Amino acid sequence: MSLCPEPNFGFLTAEFGMVTIGRMAHPDPHGPADLTPIRVGEVWENPVTRERSTILELPWTNPEGRAAAELTALVGAQVMGEHLHPALLERFTVLEGELTLKRDGQTSIVRQGETAEIEPGVWHDWWNAADRDARVRVEATPGERFAHMIETVFGLARLGHTDAKGKPPPLQLAVFAQEFSDVIVFRKPPPSVQRALFGVLAPIARRRGYRATYPQLSRTVLAPRE
């Protein structure tokens, strides 16, 4: 028996907006890898956040390293929380419908034919508040790490390992956030608090079998590239 019992992290409920951080199941960290090559035209879906992304461009097929997809943001769709990307440029071009975008504290509506750019380091959030689905071309440059992050989050949501807003539970989030800190940082709780909390939670998470991502959800890095 450990001389240093695991502390009670129930106080994280308020910080992360979750009901519990109990021993939630996670994918098998030793499960078989999905080695199906990723192809243009396939659809990645997040049933929790109501996002469907049809792949248009793979980052290893262009000199810019750009990843592009046509996002269908269903009515009520909302990304999993306000965040920033430390080192990538994100661009939204609305093809149909409209998207509500919060950028650097300012909220606006991006309508059909309009484009919004999110520079590295800018806090942003988006959702579909309209009464019809929106189709949006989304580009991330560079996009390879971004694609792996999205693949992981969407996969966890499909497998039932997120909360009602699409965010993983704290133990999963701790190892995920450390791995993808170069790609995404959430605004709440403050990043300095997150670093301290995740530094404590991550070792506990790993002992319980949680991993930043899983072989079943890592085609971006494991599957052959055609």
Image (cartoon, rainbow, N blue to C red):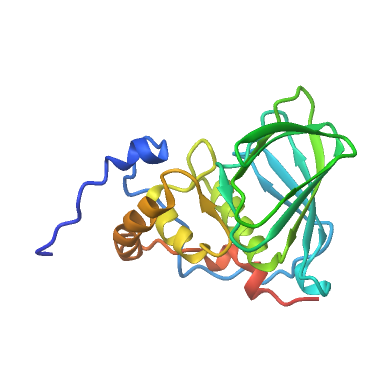
The structure residue drawn at horizontal position 65% and vertical position 57%, both measured from the top left corner, is 120
Residue 114's spot in the image, x, y percent? 86, 40
Q: Is 144 in front, or is 121?
A: 121
Q: Is 163 in front, or is 90?
A: 90
The structure residue drawn at horizontal position 20% and vertical position 55%, both measured from the top left corner, is 6
Which residue is farthest top? 131
193 vs 86: above or below? above
The structure residue drawn at horizontal position 81% and vertical position 76%, both measured from the top left corner, is 226
Q: Is 1 in front, or is 61?
A: 61
Residue 164's spot in the image, x, y percent? 51, 35
The structure residue drawn at horizontal position 60% and vertical position 37%, both measured from the top left corner, is 105
User: Count of labels shown?
Assistant: 0
Viewport quadrant of the N terminus: bottom left
Q: Is residue 173 left or right of residue 54?
A: left
Residue 133's spot in the image, x, y percent? 79, 31
Which residue is farthest right? 113
Residue 177's spot in the image, x, y percent? 47, 58
Q: Is residue 68 left or right of residue 166?
A: right
